[in-house]
Amino acid sequence: MQTSMQLPALCCKCGEKPPTSRQTIKDSRSGVSVLTLLTMFIGMRVNYNESVEYDVPLCADCDGKIKRRKVVGLLVMALGIMVAIGGIAWLFISYTTLAGAPLDANYMAQYQGLLPTMIPILAGFLIAWIGKMIRKPKLASWNNRGFRFKNKAYHKAFAELNPTMAR
């Protein structure tokens, strides 16, 4: 298998302009082996982890778009974290007010009043996860068979230069 690759002199995102910068992409795969299914009864677990880090060329316009997307993703993540912290504060305040109240026969109904405080906590985590997904540039993917670039023109040029590394 080829250990190094040649990159076309095109932007990986638009596939048209000459590149002016590079973007590092980190891609990883992990999973559970079939051996785990066979050996799980004796407490053995077989995992596999694969990772690769590679640079792709970008033109100035596409590089700027990706940088703006990363900033927007970071702001969305910050918003999600703030919403989750607000939900945790609401839960803490609600719980401390309940803690001082005497428990009666219907104490479960009192604690069920805390359930709505979970909504902003979960929503905050969801918003932060969406922000993380926004930040990740989807330029290429990799698995143990090779690379696939989102831009078809760039992928075709890459496959011509690296026939054993394109899928």
Image (spheres, helix red, strand yellow):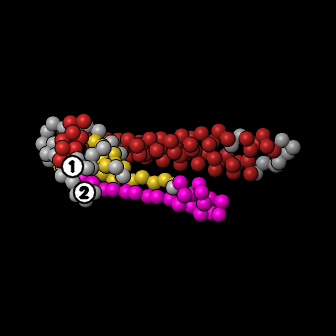
Residue 164 on image: x %, y %: 25, 50
Q: Tell me which label, 1 or 2, sits earlier in the chain.
A: 2
Residue at the spot 20% in from the left edge and 36% down from the top edge: 153
- Residue sitting at x 42%, y 52%: 29
Q: Does 75 appear above or below 48?
A: above
Q: Which residues are magenta?
A: 34-57
Badge 2 marks a residue whose secondary structure is: loop
Residue at 66% x, 60% y: name it. Answer: 41
Amino acid at the residue labelled 1: Asn
Q: Is residue 60 left or right of residue 65?
A: left
In the structure shown, which secondary structural element does the residue marked by tag 1 occupy? loop
Residue drawn 33% across and 53% down? 26
* Along the line of sight, the residue nearer the viewer: 2 or 14: 2
Residue type highlighted by circle 2: Gln
* Image quadrant where residue 12 sits: top left
Q: Is residue 50 visible?
A: yes
Side of 4 relative to 129 (left or right): left
Horizontal and vertical percent position of residue 6: 18, 52
Which residue is denoted by mark 2 in the rendering? 2
**Pointer 1: what residue?**
162
